[in-house]
Amino acid sequence: MSVNKNKLFLFLLFRTTALFFASNIPTQDEIQNQKIQVLEEDTKLRFREIWGYVMIGEEKSLPAQTPITDLGYFVNAVNNFSEFVPVPNRQERFPNFNGRIHIVSSVDSKAQTHLLLDPKLPLRNKIIKQLVHESKDYDGVQIDWELVMKDDDENFWSFLKTLKKKLKGKMLTVAIPARTKTLEKDAYNYEKLSEIVDRIIVMAYDEHWSTSAPGPVASMAWCKRIADYSMSVIPEEKLVMGCHFYARAWNNEDVGRKAYRMFKIDNILKENKVTAFKKSSDGDLSFSFDKKTKVTVFYDTIDSTVARCKMYRDLGIGSLAFWRVGQEIPAFWNELAVSN
């Protein structure tokens, strides 16, 4: 009787074990889906750091799922009183972002930048103190002062050194214009800045701009020259190449939105065959005319942006930054991943 019980027990144990393993064997469809997922992961471009910029007031433009490791929070520029405006609460604005967030400071005037950097004036220590205070709940400060004059180079570098010391271990980064060579005198000297800050974001875009002749925002050849030069003077771990999420448009006419000398109005009337005129009740004179114009747009797609990213990766660059979040085609983020 006990022998039969043992046989029954072994039979039930074997059957249960077999059913357990059978239930955990993936189906052919599941195996295929796993293979596809692995292939998709393998085709992603991997970088050590992926930075994205978010404008104040546009915090909700940050997608729920992105590979972004570092967020540049572009807050209000230094105001007319040379004060750094208080920064919003981090947890309220970015409750679900787990990466590092850096507050970004900007200045909109050459004259104001010059005064803020002057060590003889109290403005400098004041702005440093405010930057340190406002970054208390953030991971660092980024200086995006794009109007530093070349003669303020030493003042700019000493300003950064003081700010770095006052931040007490928090990250100090700078966003600076693109260069393809070392200039004789330059406040944005790549090599000098790399000795001071933790990261240098090279803004490798605006090869052509709103008032230039039409052309690419960032052609591949131009970006490669910038990358080659940057890699020769900035340590790899500090270099972050900036990429853009915008297009530019130009037209071939300059008739509108400008001032004209009075004596030229007759020529404009004749050239455009204007015959209708208006006169307001107050005596204000005006006229209108239609003019055909040609618009040229230089733009990027997901594929062209990925190609630029791949070029950077193949050159050995480990970090990218994107200006700015909310302007991109959302599916682009599926093309990138963070290195293990």
Image (cartoon, grey):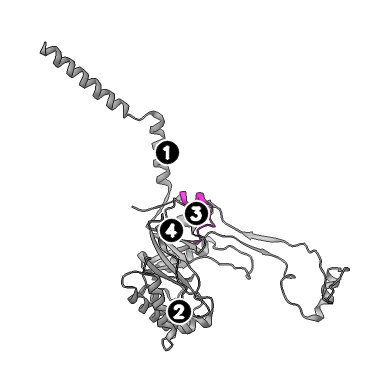
Residue wearing tag 3: 307
Amino acid on which disc 2 is placed:
Ala
Seen in the picture, residue 80 relative to 246 is either above or below; the reply is below
Amino acid on which disc 3 is placed:
Ala
Seen in the picture, residue 273 relative to 331 is either above or below; the reply is below
Q: Is residue 84 left or right of residue 290?
A: left
The residues tagged by marks 3 and 1 sit, at their Cα atoms, a distance apart of 22 Å
Q: Position of residue 217 (x, y in %)?
A: 57, 63
The residues tagged by marks 4 and 2 sit, at their Cα atoms, a distance apart of 34 Å
Residue wearing tag 4: 94
The residue drawn where x is 64% and y is 68% is 213
In the rendered structure, which disc, 3 or 1, sits on the residue that comes first in sequence? 1
Residue wearing tag 1: 36
Q: Which mark is residue 187?
A: 2
Q: Is residue 60 left or right of residue 247?
A: left
Q: Position of residue 169 (x, y in %)?
A: 31, 70
Q: Which residues are magenta?
A: 320-334
Give SS at disc 2: loop
Magenta-span inclusion, residue 331: yes
Give SS at disc 4: loop
